[in-house]
Image: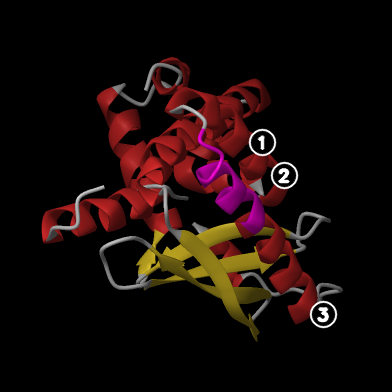
Amino acid sequence: MRNDNGSARLTRRGFTSISLAAAAVFGLPMPALALTVDDARGLIDKAVADVNRIIASGKSESAMFGDFERVFVKYADVPVIARSALGPAARQASNAQLSAFTKAYQGYLSRKYGRRFREFIGGRIEVTDARPIKSYFEVISVAYLQGEAPFDLRWHVSDKSGKDLFFNIIIEGVNMLASERTEIGALLDKNRGDIDALVAELKTI
């Protein structure tokens, strides 16, 4: 990885594109959570440890894709993230279409993450703090990459689905759920609102 400023911007932009609207989730009134700050931090500690192991594994880019997908499925609320990315179209989609989109989307994200995480080789992510926010918890971490200043990553964790899972990441103030909704919305527009065509395209990207 180059140490010039252009490379740093690419890394941060690429890492931002890793992501995944919790607008609805943010605003939902919920009862007191069984999830605690320690639980939320523990979840992200484990996820970050797995990510760091993959980065340091020395595997080829393509070999990492499956590993990242397994981490994503294990620690993320994939149905919530996928439904958020699809936006209003999710309300018109059939159950079969939502299921197909979710599966294709998690593979698409894992490949995108895998490509960008190659730039993290030699770096690491460290969890530093956690705090409650409204109906979920925010876990704060710092990414250390070679040749650039550390930057802030914040993970949003909830047990709304019945398990402790993260549903969003904020990178230097950039909401990845919102970013993903914009990207998937553009792809859906490109496919003239056809969810089946969108699913087919995601499998090729």
Residue at x-position 20% and y-position 50%: 2
Task: Report the residue marked by disc 2.
Answer: 74
Q: Amino acid at mark 1?
A: Arg
Q: Position of residue 36 (x, y in %)?
A: 80, 78
Circle 3 sits in a helix, a strand or a loop, which is it?
loop
On screen, residue 122 above or below 196: below
For residue 184, side relative to residue 159 (left or right)? left
For residue 101, side relative to residue 79 (left or right)? left
Q: How many angstroms separate mark 2 from mark 1 (CA)?
A: 6 Å
51 in the magenta segment:
yes
Along the line of sight, the residue nearer the viewer: 102 or 115: 115
Q: How many angstroms separate mark 3 from mark 1 (CA)?
A: 30 Å
Q: Where the C terminus falls, by quadrant?
A: top left
Q: Residues within 10 Å of mark 3 (few under 14, many from 20)?
A: few
Task: Report the residue marked by disc 1.
Answer: 70
Q: Position of residue 115 (x, y in %)?
A: 38, 36
For residue 55, side relative to residue 182 (left or right)? right
Q: Which mark is residue 32?
A: 3
Residue at x-position 19% and y-position 52%: 7
Of circles 3 and 1, the one toward us is: 1
Magenta stretch: give its range.
49-58
Circle 2 sits in a helix, a strand or a loop, which is it?
helix
118 in the magenta segment:
no
Q: Amino acid at mark 3?
A: Ala
Disc 2 to disc 1: CB gap under 8 Å? yes
